[in-house]
Image: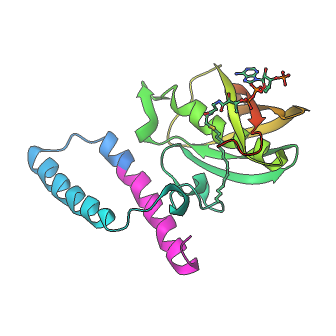
Amino acid sequence: MPDEASAGDYAAMIEDLRGFLDRLSSARPSPEAVRCLREALTGWSAELDRSQVPEHDRVFGRLAGLPGRGQTMSPRLEIVETGPDGSRGTVRFGRYHLGRNGAAHGGSIPLVFDEILGQVARVNGRSLARTAYLRVDYRSITPIDRDLEISARLVSVTGRKYVVAGELRDGPVLCAEAEALFVELRPGRP
Ligand SMILES: CCCCCCCCCCCCCCCC(=O)SCCNC(=O)CCNC(=O)[C@H](O)C(C)(C)COP(=O)(O)OP(=O)(O)OC[C@H]1O[C@@H](n2cnc3c(N)ncnc32)[C@H](O)[C@@H]1OP(=O)(O)O
């Protein structure tokens, strides 16, 4: 893990990357701008080629205190309260997550449910638990570019099985709800 000072820089870089992806997805760049961006990206990749590491040493997605654990794959999730029975937070779908007509892409919504529901299972699980199923019901469109409320609650624990349910709301509007089963891995199972 990076030290405290570089963790701050890393966090800021991840936020910059989110901003870049939002701008990229809503841009119509000129051929000259595309050439310029490609050149910059080639330089960034060459820089990162110098610091590739195995999975267990990577930083991306492993900074528990940061929104979204310091990764950009799923929308920006910020947990504001967590406990053994559940958690709640805010999530923001950016322009990068746009499906059509102002609604977030349907595939980006399970991503964020897997995160928050999985964290509740993990708080409860003695060891790592994996998603066995994740069901999402889309109740109303999920708007982008504003903070939405998201919550998860533990429904039941049966042996190694944890059922967790979640809701995504835009104020009084229920955008989506989810239910997932997490199964705690047997010892020695990768
Ligand atoms: C250091 C930095 C930290 C940073 C901070 C970390 C924070 C961390 C937060 C992470 C938050 C993200 C969390 C994402 C988590 C994933 O997304 S994991 C990736 C997606 N999931 C997978 O790849 C799982 C693939 N499947 C499997 O590996 C296996 O099928 C499973 C799920 C582990 C189950 O296998 P198994 O242990 O052999 O289980 P098995 O004995 O078959 O079944 C056990 C029980 O579960 C039931 N079951 C199993 N599957 C199902 C199913 N699909 N439907 C219904 N029942 C089922 C069985 O019927 C059985 O029930 P009982 O007979 O006991 O009543």
Residue 42 is situated, as x and y percent measured from the top left of the image, at 21, 57
- Residue at left offset 43%, top offset 62%: 53
- Residue at left offset 55%, top offset 59%: 56
Q: In the drawing, does residue 149 fall left or right of residue 25? A: right
Q: Can you tell me which quadrant of the image ligand 1 is in?
A: top right
Magenta-tinted stretch? 1-20
Image height of 121 relative to 11, above or below: above
- Residue at left offset 58%, top offset 78%: 4
The answer to which quarter of the image holds residue 154 is top right
Front-most of 54 and 142? 54
Q: Is residue 16 visible?
A: yes
Can you name the residue that lies furthest to the left here? 32
Image height of 96 relative to 165, above or below: below
Residue 13 drawn in magenta: yes
Which of the colour schemes (rainbow, by chain, secondary structure, one colour) is used? rainbow
Q: In the drawing, does residue 29 fall left or right of residue 7? A: left
Where, quadrant-wise, is the N terminus in this rendering?
Answer: bottom right
Task: Please tell me how many numbered marks the rendered image carries.
Answer: 0
Residue 159 is situated, as x and y percent measured from the top left of the image, at 89, 33
The answer to which quarter of the image holds residue 109 is top right
Residue 14 drawn in magenta: yes
- Residue at left offset 66%, top offset 62%: 65
Front-most of 133 and 65? 133
